[in-house]
Amino acid sequence: MQNFHPIASKYETLKARLLEINDITSAAGLLYWDQATYMPPGGATARGRQIATLRQIAHQKFTDPALGELLEDLKSYEESLEYDSDAASLIRVTRRKYQKAIQVPEEFMARMSKHHSATYAVWAKARAENDFRAVQPYLEKNLELSQEMASFFPGYEHIADPLIDFYDYGMTVAQLRPLFTDLKSKLIHLVEAIASQPPIDNSFLHQHFPEHQQLNFTRKVVTSLGYDFNRGRQDKTLHPFMTKFSLGDVRITTRVYENDFSQALFSSIHETGHALYEQGICPSYEGSPLANGTSAGIHESQSRLWENTIGRSRGFWGYFYPQLQGVFLNQLKHISVDQFYRGINKVERSLIRTDADEVTYNLHVAIRFELELDLLAGKLTIQDLPEAWNQRYESDLGIRPQGDRDGVMQDVHWYSGLIGGQFQGYTLGNAIAAQIYQTAIRRNPAITVDIEQGKFDTLHQWLKENIYQHGSKYTPNELLERVTGQPLTIEPFITYIYQKYHGLYDLNSFNLGKDIGQEINH
Amino acid sequence: MQNFHPIASKYETLKARLLEINDITSAAGLLYWDQATYMPPGGATARGRQIATLRQIAHQKFTDPALGELLEDLKSYEESLEYDSDAASLIRVTRRKYQKAIQVPEEFMARMSKHHSATYAVWAKARAENDFRAVQPYLEKNLELSQEMASFFPGYEHIADPLIDFYDYGMTVAQLRPLFTDLKSKLIHLVEAIASQPPIDNSFLHQHFPEHQQLNFTRKVVTSLGYDFNRGRQDKTLHPFMTKFSLGDVRITTRVYENDFSQALFSSIHETGHALYEQGICPSYEGSPLANGTSAGIHESQSRLWENTIGRSRGFWGYFYPQLQGVFLNQLKHISVDQFYRGINKVERSLIRTDADEVTYNLHVAIRFELELDLLAGKLTIQDLPEAWNQRYESDLGIRPQGDRDGVMQDVHWYSGLIGGQFQGYTLGNAIAAQIYQTAIRRNPAITVDIEQGKFDTLHQWLKENIYQHGSKYTPNELLERVTGQPLTIEPFITYIYQKYHGLYDLNSFNLGKDIGQEINH
């Protein structure tokens, strides 16, 4: 049968191929979700293999030369369309990912995936036993694999650039390092100022809060924020994450500590931020590469925006605190909303990144980011990594891990994926959250007023319209320019963090330095 | 590099290919499990497509001509080995399935899968609204698809034979129909005799039994039977099933009715029977076509054996009833173990197959089996199916559905899969359970004594050794001959059912007919 619309037909073929790949990847995602929530111990061996098998098949299909030919055939079609039309964007984003994917040999992908699974298992045991040396050879091998991965992308300026590019497309060490260095020095200064003030008492957060009450309250909060339980669900896990199997099935996970009220609630709001992004993507992108958040940093900006900028704000608790007191009357009846607000924003020099407050958090990230740059560049060995880690904690945070369990082995990232690329997104997230929120409330001042009334829809809709709906259509840099009118900057974050903690810690009498004073006032 | 062991290498290649296919199929299984347990409503559309995508990929890979060439190359190797060696069996079983699979065009598989998904969705709504006509066109199309499926296997005697062959390899209408007809007439006679006796009072089963207590007791029971929760788990669903993602992850599901004690417990024991089979397969078969129960009928024999032969026996409850009374003291303190035993074995003419007792159950199955033979052979139209259904219920069971919801729309099978092949396995299961159990207790009389002591390991180990470990190594007929020394027969089931219900309903004074009397005494 003659085809009267060869280009339209090729475009449909491209979409069908991408949909198949999406389905395989989504299935791998469900296998992972199940592994982290409900899978019995006996399923572990086969499950690791099954996830690897699906990912390998997806990779094979995505790197099929026939896909490359389709993209080539569609080039003139793409050029005939507006840059930000859905079709041009789909072809453009697919081509970008395709050209990256075909650089990586299938054999390498399988080898790396297998090694990551093995390393994960050894790490879990080594961490429990506080025995870094047990996992050291695996980590050494993983560093080699990460360097090998970078080697498939010659022409980089820094060896970490191709790895960063996987997560935060278009960002480089050259762009990020100065920003991070600047941020770090300002935060160290702020943490010092805070440390010289009387500590906040947050002991009331460590009373007994029954699990089911925590989960009920959490569910109420995340529903208010806009999380759609008809298109998602929440389950318990060891390390909370968000995952998506389709735009109609975007799940969050949490963990509950009955002696720490903060964990379940704030990690749930965090994952809800990720989920709102995915649930808000334009439905017609379903099953295509456009139907994902555009980068790790932009994604993290949404989780941090909801978790910290909103979830730890005075306005938010002005609305929710009476409800919370109603649920936990015995625990909170003598705690005022201001005490509570101060308690959940206590700044503390601590060892564990995931437990860190929003001021020290970026110092934790900076340590990892800088260490992995050194590892990749051959300036630091895995052998010396634990000591380098501990020294950095001592110098930047003024606190030294007593064991590698709470030091270099605390995060799963290096033990289950690439060394390099995974950490910068966390700090980018905080910076971008501030940059975006600053724009949002300038454009629509009703946002903050509405939040005080428990109306989160104003912000949610603004974010959906400006960010969520676009999925991966724009690169992170394009999106930032488009939304905020300027490139990535850490200034809004510095302003936000100084203003907030200035008030919380009564820092008026402190000389915060010329630069910082200016930022507070601008 | 020269290969010094070309045959060994080809055998390893075959196993690697089969493992990949197994992983894809297992992933599809998990997607289904999740759909039936935890998936939010918004996930439905994509999930149906994702399952279909994975199954299609698995089918493509299994019908790859390269697999056929491997099997061809391995023919002489297979012939050089003992018939029941693992390697010969793996090659033989794979070849059999391959030769069947390549008859079915990939395009047809995709079309059928898509139609089954669509039909399922329409059925769920039509059933809720008691509106058969809404799903009728879908069912008509499904009948055509089932007939088309049969057409890929020319040379059959009855059009249902190729479909039965998918589920119960080697069985045919010619073999089964006489057995089923004989069984039916004997059961109708028995049901009539029972109906003329005073009904058993089982109203105590319909008190309030709190869900968590039911689930706790159920968990205790299935653990005692040998179900390994380290290699499985139990979750709630609408229509209970067993599923396996690896030999280390074999899951069961259940549903709980707080006003009906029987549901959760007996359906859990039923699914546990299926699960014990899968958990008991030789671990070295993992990921190969040998690592599955060998047929629907043999599988069902294990679920029915544990559910009915054991779970509804006097010996079983002699052990468990005091524990049950301990849990449900208020509900059961005035009910003796004998009253309880009679209550859970009450025979009743009822409309719903899945709720039927073990006497009338096979009459439900016979109706479906015979109707689908007529549908496939073109002797009955879908248009006339509801009335034919109702008439058969009236003539065989003496009871007529008031609506199609409780009639022709009650079972999911025809609305989500082939019409033909799926039902005979249920009655085969009952017959084979009796045939196998008769052999088991003849060979090891300790089995019944041990059950009265709550020791189920004696039976479990016997079944594991004689049936479970072999997976799909033997065909159903081979396995029956091997285990019981004779071909498939319904006599042990007739003997079992008459002996048991003779006692329960005091049928001594009734003339059960010459044939039946002989069977009871033989």
Image: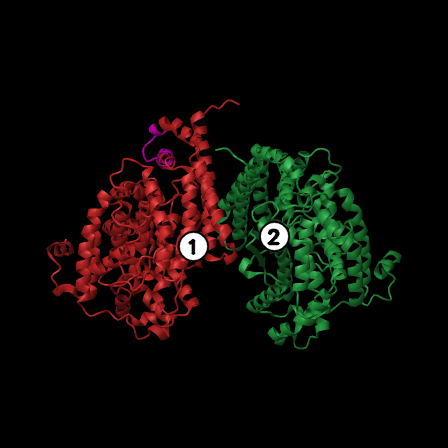
Chain colours: A red, B green
Magenta stretch bounds: A78-98
Examine the structure image and report whether residue B349 is included in the region drawn in magenta.
Answer: no
Q: Nearer the viewer, residue B54 or B492?
A: B492
> Hey, what amino acid is under mark 2?
Cys
Q: Position of residue A261 (x, y in %)?
A: 35, 67
The answer to whether residue A247 of the structure is visible from this angle is: no
Chain on which label 1 sits: A
Residue under circle 2? B282
Where disc 1 sits, the SS reads helix
Examine the structure image and report whether residue A81 is included in the region drawn in magenta.
Answer: yes
Where disc 2 sits, the SS reads loop
Vertical placement of A152 versus B293: above or below? Answer: above
- Judged left or right of residue B478, residue A500 is left
Label 2 Cα crowd, 10 Å radius (few <14 / some 14-19 / many 20+): some
User: Image point 36% across, 47% down: which residue?
Assistant: A141
User: Image point 32% across, 36% down: which residue?
Assistant: A84
The answer to whether residue A492 of the structure is visible from this angle is: yes
In the image, farthest residue toward the top = A2
Residue under circle 1? A121
Residue A239's disc is none
Vertical placement of A166 versus B256: above or below? Answer: above
User: Image point 33% across, 53% down: which residue?
Assistant: A303
Q: Position of residue B420 (x, y in %)?
A: 69, 43
